[in-house]
Image: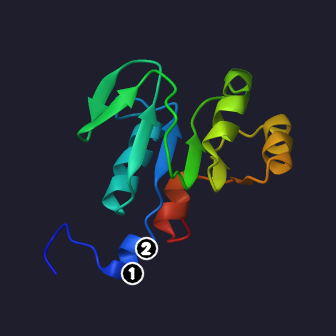
Amino acid sequence: MQFGEFSTEKKLNMKRTLIIGASSNPERYAYKAAERLLAHGHEIELLGLRPDVIFGQTIDTERKQYQHLDTVTLYIGPKNQPGYYDYVVSLKPNRVIFNPGTENPEFEIILKKNGIAYEEACTLVLLGTNQY
């Protein structure tokens, strides 16, 4: 196997992920998550406040109806989340990750009612411990 190739088993374990709160600032955890997700072979979509390109991926500023998402990982605080409730539910991801500082019991109830799993966890830690 050559660099950049993934085994069939690895391909089956890739999780298409939308990062909400994406940033082109290398100091932000959303940026680090994008970098690590790609390094682990996951496909990413990026949604942020400012358009930009990181790692060859466009940061979208408009809420698109992304298809076949496994995970939505949040990097926006609870006060900024209500405007995203219906949007995230409409995407029908398998799960939503509330990274540290984004925990939101109100949103968790909405996700549960819609059959969407959620966890309060750190995307970077999950990747680093092979639990993603």
Measured as percent of width and height from the top left, residue 131 is found at 56, 70
| Residue 11, horizontal then vertical, whole percent | 37, 71
How many marks overall?
A: 2
Residue 74 x/y as whole percent = 60, 39
Q: Label 2 belongs to which residue?
A: 12
Residue at x 15%, y 71% (from the top left corner):
3
- Residue drawn at point x = 50 percent, y = 43 percent: 18
The reply to whether residue 2 is in sight is: yes
Q: Judge whether 120 appears above or below 41 on screen.
A: above
Residue located 40% across and 26% down the image: 60
Across and down, in percent, residue 35 comes to 34, 48
Given the image, on which type of amino acid does mark 2 rest?
A: Leu
Q: Residue furthest top?
A: 50
Screen quadrant of the C terminus: bottom right
Between marks 1 and 2, how big is the CA–CA gap?
A: 5 Å
Q: Place residue 91 in its image quadrant.
A: top right
Label 2: which secondary element: helix
In the rendered view, tell whether residue 82 sits above or below residue 115.
above
In the displayed structure, 1 sits above or below 90; it is below
Under mark 1, the amino acid is Glu
Q: Which residue is mark 1?
A: 9
Pointers 1 and 2 in contact (CB under 8 A)?
A: yes
| Residue 101 in sight from this viewpoint | no
The structure residue drawn at horizontal position 16% and vertical position 81%, both measured from the top left corner, is 1
